[in-house]
Image (cartoon, rainbow, N blue to C red):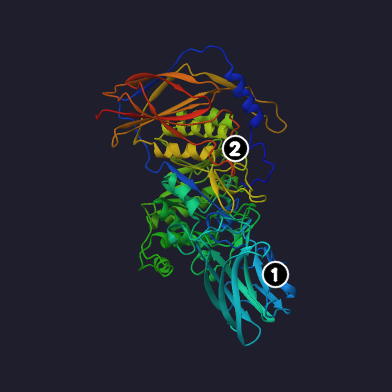
Amino acid sequence: MKTSLPLSPRRAPAASRRALALLAALACGGVAAQTELTIDLAKPGIPVSTALYGLMTEEINYSYDGGLYAELLRNRSFKDDPSEPVHWSVVQDAGGAGTLALDPGQPVPRTALTTSLRLDATGARTGHRVAITNDGYWGIPLKPDTTYRASFYARTAGAGGVPLTVSLEGNDGKTVYAKAQGGPIDGQWRRYSVTLHTAAGLAPTAAARFVIATESPGTLWFNLVSLFPPTYHDRPNGNRVDLMQKLVDMKPRFLRFPGGNYLEGETVDTRFKWKQTLGPLAQRPGHPGTWNYRSSDGMGLLEFLEWCEDMHAEPVLAVFAGYALKGETIPAGPGLQPFVDEALDEIEYVTGDVSTKWGAQRARDGHPAPFKLRYVEIGNEDGFDRQKTYDGRYTQFHDAIKAKYPQLKLIATAGGKDSVGVRQAVTSRTPDLVDEHYYYGALQMMHDAGRYDSYARGGPKIFIGEWAAREGAPTTNLISALADAAWMTGMERNADVVEMACYAPLLVNVNPGGMQWKSDLIGYDAQTSYGSPSYHAQKMFSHYLGEQSLALTARNVPTQTWQPPAKKDQAAPPPQQVPTLFFSATRSSARGELYLKVVNALGNAKSVQVALAGAAQVAPEGQAITLRSDRPEDTNTITAPDKIVPVTTTARGLGPSFRYSFAPYSVTVLVLKLGRR
Ligand code: AHR
């Protein structure tokens, strides 16, 4: 469900101030009984899904365009605004004169490039250049000794022979960082490309612009004007290196794409039409996104799959299921069948060999090898469908997909009690998994961290496909990280129910106007990026995860009082008690290690007496990885990216029974070395 700022109370029910005050009050509390934790190593424990922690992504907060997708020019195909060439302007040097306009009368033949940029360089002459210039996504980031690849379609009004100069320069045009000759162009539409190399001594800057200039008078047209820096794994049309590295560092087991609301579209016609995201960029029309800006579709279906490949993560493919955000619904029946067929084609594009129609298309697009696919999600948040048509729609997709691909696990998007969306269950078929979404304030997240402890077993497995504690903006702060970690201990304790989970949203461009959804995991501007405390908590949980989740019992866990917010026009609900310490323990038999995860949500250190019941041997020394800060509202920012990061120390005095003091406001992973069983 899309919300606009300010947030609806449903999405941010606990105000930061109240949460922080409550935590502070508890921090000053009286002497408490010793907290005791017993972990049962005598029993094998429950298997932890190999796919537990993954990533969720969609085009929101300039996640791809202006984010992960490495294209540096904004509005490269001139469709972002139908009335003017936004982010483009004219350069008129030393008295050279010219004007810019959108020109729908000059499409590039046999492409999706329907509107061109027209430059009337009437006053251009030698020494008096006239140029088009682009300001990028909040600047164009330049680094020293780096090669940039520029390309564009162009033609002139006359027969031709017009040379062009392509450059990267300072915003005032005085400093030229890199320059190359382009063209000469003529009266036919052609594609040109040049490389631009910056000097070794360049100080990194984003105060730069991209320029294509002429010194000959006349009319010129341009389209698909593009500039790429080096990309992750040097993929053409690839991804930004620093952001990819942050994602790879999370060790994600899967990537859920392409949404989110972005899958659905505001209307059926503006859904993610995967067939229009394939092949050469000139063939991709782009489409209006669901978060108030247009998508270039440079990040198309194959790019999503290659992104998975680069992270060694498996795709979780969400297919459009006949429900769009503004409520348009296509009920089950013959009218839905084309969309079912579209999903079957999509699965074939991902998994089919080159003898299949769509597998052959994938090969033509540059990737002959099929991708491994285990999970397909039918729609997104279909619980919001007020016509309540999802049961029928799900059934039609389920039957068709299972008939052709019986090995695939199918995920339904409506079900989960209290998860986001109007509750409506799928009853006619049994999905393999149900996707539940939870966006809460920090204290509610902590309160609900035990949700799956008492969850009914025997039904579909749970995919927590979107969730987050939402305090702090643009990226979340420490109290959110504590609440997230508390919630993840609940996932790990209940690994028999929770098969997969991914936090959302993943990415946010922190520039003014870059954020549509407050509280995100990774922030960036044109030049640099950083992980929120929640990002580091995710990494810790993903890195230190065993194959079995061990039963544990905690005694004398202090609690704090949480006042749930009142619903509109209703009395305040009764206050609730919320634990302040949270635990999970997983064992890796392969590595001979036990990972004890502990969250201390209070402002004082908390000593816990730990018993490892049934442990043969425990090494006296292990590791402690701790994420903490002095105040729960502390956070990381683009200018202070590493204020809160995990610190690894040696943990001493460990054994079958030991006491450990957990730092105030901390997430800790204790790595214990076990004797072989
Ligand atoms: O994560 C932001 C949005 O929240 C997603 O697009 C949607 O699925 C959910 O309502």
Is disc 2 surrounded by few (<14), some (14 to 19) or many (20+) residues within 10 Å?
A: many
- Specify the quadrant of the image occupied by residue 562: top right
Q: Which of the 4 image quarters holds residue 540?
A: top left
Q: Closest to the observer: 360 or 630? A: 630
**x 35%, y 64%: residue:** 353
Q: Position of residue 141 (x, y in %)?
A: 57, 57
Q: Earlier in the sequence, mark 2 or mark 1?
A: 1
User: Foreground: 200 or 375?
Assistant: 200
- Badge 1 density bin: few <14, some 14–19, many ≥20, Cα 10 Å: many
Which amino acid does the dot numbered 1 rest on?
Val
Task: Give percent across and percent down for residue 539.
Answer: 45, 40
Viewer-nearest residue: 547 or 147:
147
Q: Nearer the viewer, residue 164 or 474?
A: 164
Q: Which is in the foreground here, disc 2 or disc 1?
A: 1
Query: Does the residue tagged 1 have its C-beta within 8 Å of any atom of ligand 1?
Result: no
Q: Is residue 509 above or below residue 117?
A: above
Location of mark 1 (residue): 91
